[in-house]
């Protein structure tokens, strides 16, 4: 595996090129501001009258309707939600993709599942920061960056990788390292991670643990602390120093319990079902299902969201969190007025 750093960047790769950032959400805002502060010529492409327009303008960026921004740009970064990309591309970007331009993604979904099939005579690349946009921006402001994945899907110019790397450099990614991958690997591992482990796996582990304790007669408040609240302490240790640091900081009893009971809960059956999840991602079954769900107006999505939000753990948690001042977003308002994560949630 190769990790690209600042020394691998050809600063001339994007010299004189205008960059259009399409979408101004989590990633779009961070990329646009970082690239502008790095000296690039940036224009943000948005729906006229959309909620992001005023925010991008007040952040000091040039803003134009999507088609206009795409027409004027050499590199077009597709940072609208994955489910919106097909239509935005077909209606407002494709007509302006003349030879020599670059189309950039931060996630490979649209390309891998062929919702977007770009013309052959352009470069198609990916720079996928491994962090939410607010961290991409914050790290850049501190003179650092977050690691990125880089991939080249089409190299019509012979410059595709150099351009992608220069873009990653402009958002701060080369400070932390840029790892080469391909669209398929990034997309399939990203979907698998969020489904089996990060979002799906963890939320089910937490709620099933909570249910087990409450059904056995323990107080929900106590179960909440054990199964949800303390998760962050463990995850922080793992992120800082891997399993070794976590194991170093928990008690000997916790370690022994981890060794004997962890594999009983998360056993080979779980791994077999993880493989099924991965199979559905690789075959395109998951993508087909999610696209159809969108076309139908997301009825199951909304029902499942409602089911998660009305779980008893949410009610118990809200009451307990209200007593923990340091968790209250208002508590941190002074420091966080500029935090796009807070704004993005609005
Ligand atoms: P987002 O939902 O935060 O923001 C999308 C923005 O697109 C909106 O704020 C709006 O300005 C604009 N938009 C929405 N619909 C539009 C339309 N029809 N026409 C024009 N503009 C429209 O999206 P995001 O999370 O920044 O995701 C953008 C891309 O980055 C996706 O491909 C995603 O997979 C990828 N990505 C996201 C993260 C993350 O942490 N959020 C991390 C890595 C990669
Ligand atoms: Mg869930």
Image (cartoon, rainbow, N blue to C red):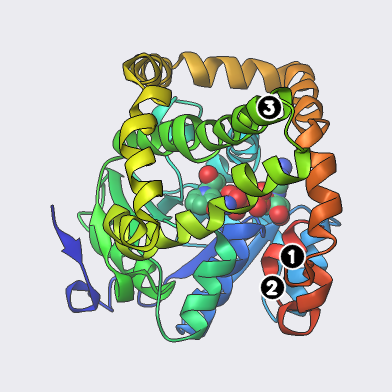
The residue nearer to you, when weighing 77 against 29, is 29
Tell me if residue 150 comes above or below residue 191 in the rendering: below
Q: Is disc 3 in contact with disc 2, using a CB cutoff of under 8 Å?
A: no
Disc 3: CA contacts within 10 A as few (<14), some (14-19) or many (>=20): many
Left or right, residue 238 beside residue 200: left
Could you tell me residue 159's position as x and y percent? 23, 59
Q: Is residue 269 visible?
A: yes
**How crowded is the residue under tag 2: few (<14 C-alpha within 10 Å), some, or many (20+)?**
some
Q: Position of residue 12 (x, y in %)?
A: 28, 77
What residue is drawn where x is 35% and y is 77%?
Answer: 15
Q: Secondary structure at mark 1?
A: helix
- If the image is split into quadrants, where does the C terminus sit? bottom right
Relative to 293, residue 91 above or below: below
Above or below — where is 316 with respect to 52? above
Q: Which mark is residue 339?
A: 2
- Quarter of the rendering containing residue 71: bottom right
Circle 2 sits in a helix, a strand or a loop, which is it? loop
The residue lying at 50 percent from left, 55 percent from top is 77
Secondary structure type for disc 3: helix
The residue indicated by pointer 1 is 342
Q: How many marks?
A: 3
For the residues labelled 1 and 2, the Cα–Cα distance comes to 6 Å
**Towards the viewer: 36 or 137:** 137
Residue 113 appears at what percent x and percent y?
44, 25
Question: In terms of depth relative to the viewer, which is nearer, 238 or 2?
Answer: 238
Residue 303 vs residue 24: left or right?
Answer: right
Report the residue marked by disc 3.
211
Label 1 to label 3: alpha-carbon separation: 31 Å
């Amino acid at each position: 595996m190769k990790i690209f750093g600042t020394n691998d960047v050809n600063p001339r790769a994007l010299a004189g090129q205008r960059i259009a950032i399409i979408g101004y959400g989590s990633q779009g805002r961070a990329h646009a501001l970082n690239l502008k502060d790095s000296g690039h010529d940036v224009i943000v492409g948005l729906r006229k009258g959309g909620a992001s327009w005023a925010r991008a303008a007040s952040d000091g960026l040039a803003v134009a309707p999507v088609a206009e921004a795409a027409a004027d740009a050499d590199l077009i970064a597709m940072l609208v939600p994955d489910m919106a990309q097909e239509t935005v591309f077909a209606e407002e970007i494709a007509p302006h993709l003349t030879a020599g331009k670059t189309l950039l993604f931060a996630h490979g979904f649209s390309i891998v599942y062929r919702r977007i099939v770009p013309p052959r005579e352009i470069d198609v690349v990916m720079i996928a920061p491994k962090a939410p946009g607010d961290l991409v921006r914050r790290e850049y402001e501190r003179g650092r960056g977050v690691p990125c994945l880089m991939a080249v899907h089409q190299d019509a110019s012979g410059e595709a990788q150099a351009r992608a790397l220069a873009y990653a450099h402009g958002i701060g990614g080369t400070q932390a390292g840029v790892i080469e991958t391909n669209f398929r690997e990034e997309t399939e591992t990203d979907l698998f991670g969020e489904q089996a482990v990060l979002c799906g796996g963890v939320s089910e582990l937490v709620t099933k643990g909570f249910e087990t304790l409450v059904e056995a007669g323990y107080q929900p408040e106590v179960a909440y602390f054990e199964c949800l609240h303390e998760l962050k302490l463990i995850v922080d240790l793992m992120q800082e120093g891997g399993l070794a640091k976590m194991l170093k900081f928990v008690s000997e009893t916790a370690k022994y319990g981890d060794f004997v009971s962890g594999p009983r809960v998360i056993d080979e059956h779980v791994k077999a079902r993880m493989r099924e999840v991965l199979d559905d991602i690789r075959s395109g079954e998951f993508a087909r299902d999610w696209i159809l769900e969108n076309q139908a107006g997301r009825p199951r999505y909304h029902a499942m969201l409602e089911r998660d939000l009305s779980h008893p753990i949410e009610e118990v948690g809200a009451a307990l969190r209200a007593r923990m001042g340091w968790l209250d977003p208002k508590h941190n308002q002074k420091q966080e007025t500029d935090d796009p994560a807070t704004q993005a949630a609005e």
